[in-house]
Image: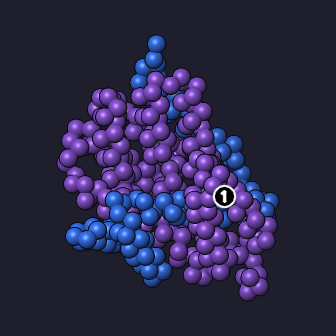
Chain colours: A purple, B blue
């Protein structure tokens, strides 16, 4: 496949991200406007950060006039999950891919772009990744712009309906592999149950969502790797024993 | 004096970019260790599952609609439908259920 073919494939695969981002960033744009940011500031914020939870919490801190160090610490905690995702992606990039690509690819490591990238078979082409990032960033920045300039352009019903699109996409990524691997199916169920526990149980629910994701990812993936190490071809070893 | 909005934006962008960049550039070789390879293999499944549930239930303006959208997405994903099909059908289900007068 040629570079532009990879790029086009990435753009196509990113359409659900585009739609989901449009809805979420539209809401972000409305909030940014309410916090007193100009159109330009909101657009620069979205284009330079490309992250949802971090930006929403950032708005709160900007409005409160928090110290810059507090802003840095908050962003670090909320976005630390990207560190795990980048570790995972580092193994999907071909060793022969020129090194400088990693500096550009790092910009686009979001929950959704990561999810779609890992669901693709084989090595990850930087150009496929750039296609994904381009269409996704277009949705993210465009939605922000529309939210600030016209908070009523997208009807609330449409925004509400599209807000589930990204979750639907995640489900479409994790469920098919679970059909052929009982280990993966079990891990998905355990992850969801523990996530529910961490959201509802006293004390545990005080943990921020960013840390919840990190703690559960490290603990559950670690346990799974210990009990069900994968074979070199990527499949789970001794699946029949599980 | 409060820092300017642009100072905040610069700090946010720098912290977020470095978190994304460091693992990508520091881990250049293929990891041979079986435990770490297995760990990284499982990471996406756990991370995405934790992000989906229970957050999906409060993603839209009604819990019933979200639950129905969740169910629709699970069924379609099980039938190996594409990402865009699952995402749009879940949205369509939410849209239709929110049209119902009782909710």
**Quadrant showing the C terminus of chain A:** bottom right
Q: Position of residue A229 (x, y in %)?
A: 77, 70
Q: Position of residue A85 (x, y in %)?
A: 60, 53
Q: Chain of mark 1?
A: A
Instruction: Kindly tell me whether residue A5 is visible in this rendering.
Output: no
Q: Residue furthest bottom?
A: A240
Quick one: A205 or B11, which is closer to the camera? Answer: A205
Q: Residue at x 73, y 86 (%)?
A: A240
Mark 1 falls on what kind of element?
A: helix
Q: Position of residue A32 (x, y in %)?
A: 34, 36
- Mark 1 surroundings: few (<14), some (14-19) or many (≥20) residues within 10 A: many
Q: Residue at x 75, y 77 (%)?
A: A237
Quick one: B36 or B77, which is closer to the camera? Answer: B77
Q: Residue at x 47, y 56 (%)?
A: A112
Q: Is residue A34 left or right of residue A116?
A: left
Q: Residue furthest top?
A: B1
Examine the image and state in which quarter residue B72 appears: bottom left
Which residue is tagged 1?
Answer: A216
Quick one: A64 or A43, which is closer to the camera? Answer: A64
Residue B39 position (above or below residue A100): below
Examine the image and state in which quarter residue A72 appears: top right
Q: Is residue A196 left or right of residue A59?
A: right
Instruction: Kindly tell me whether residue B11 is visible in this rendering.
Output: yes
Q: Is residue A97 left or right of residue A162?
A: right
Q: Residue at x 36, y 60 (%)?
A: B60
Examine the image and state in which quarter residue A71 appears: top right
């Amino acid at each position: 496949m040629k570079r532009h073919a990879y790029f086009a494939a990435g753009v196509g695969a990113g359409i659900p991200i585009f739609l989901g981002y449009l809805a979420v960033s539209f809401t972000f744009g409305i909030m940014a406007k309410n916090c007193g940011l100009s159109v330009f500031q909101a657009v620069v914020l979205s284009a330079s950060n490309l992250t949802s939870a971090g930006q929403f919490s950032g708005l709160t801190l900007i409005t409160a006039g928090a110290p810059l160090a507090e802003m840095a610490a908050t962003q670090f905690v909320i976005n630390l999950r990207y560190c795990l995702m980048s570790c995972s992606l580092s193994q999907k990039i071909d060793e022969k891919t020129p090194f400088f690509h990693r500096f550009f690819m790092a910009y686009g490591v979001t929950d959704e772009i990561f999810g779609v990238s890992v669901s693709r078979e084989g090595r990850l082409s930087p150009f496929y990744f750039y296609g994904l990032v381009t269409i996704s960033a277009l949705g993210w920045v465009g939605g922000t712009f529309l939210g600030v300039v016209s908070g009523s352009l997208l009807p609330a019903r449409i925004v509400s309906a599209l807000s589930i699109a990204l979750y639907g996409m995640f489900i479409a990524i994790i469920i098919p592999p679970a059909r052929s691997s009982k280990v993966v199916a079990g891990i998905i169920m355990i992850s969801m149950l523990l996530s529910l526990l961490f959201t509802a149980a006293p004390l545990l629910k005080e943990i921020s969502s960013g840390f919840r994701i990190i703690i559960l990812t490290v603990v559950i993936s670690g346990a799974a790797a210990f009990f069900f190490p994968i074979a070199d071809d990527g499949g789970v070893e001794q699946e029949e024993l599980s | 004096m409060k820092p300017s909005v642009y100072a905040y934006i610069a700090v946010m962008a720098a912290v977020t970019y470095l978190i994304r960049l460091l693992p990508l550039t520091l881990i250049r070789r293929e990891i041979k260790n079986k435990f770490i390879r297995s760990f990284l293999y499982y990471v996406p499944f756990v991370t995405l599952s934790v992000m989906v549930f229970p957050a999906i239930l409060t993603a839209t303006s009604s819990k019933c609609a979200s639950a129905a959208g969740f169910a629709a997405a699970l069924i379609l994903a099980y039938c190996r439908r594409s990402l865009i099909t699952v995402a749009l059908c879940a949205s369509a289900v939410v849209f239709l259920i929110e049209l119902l007068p009782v909710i």
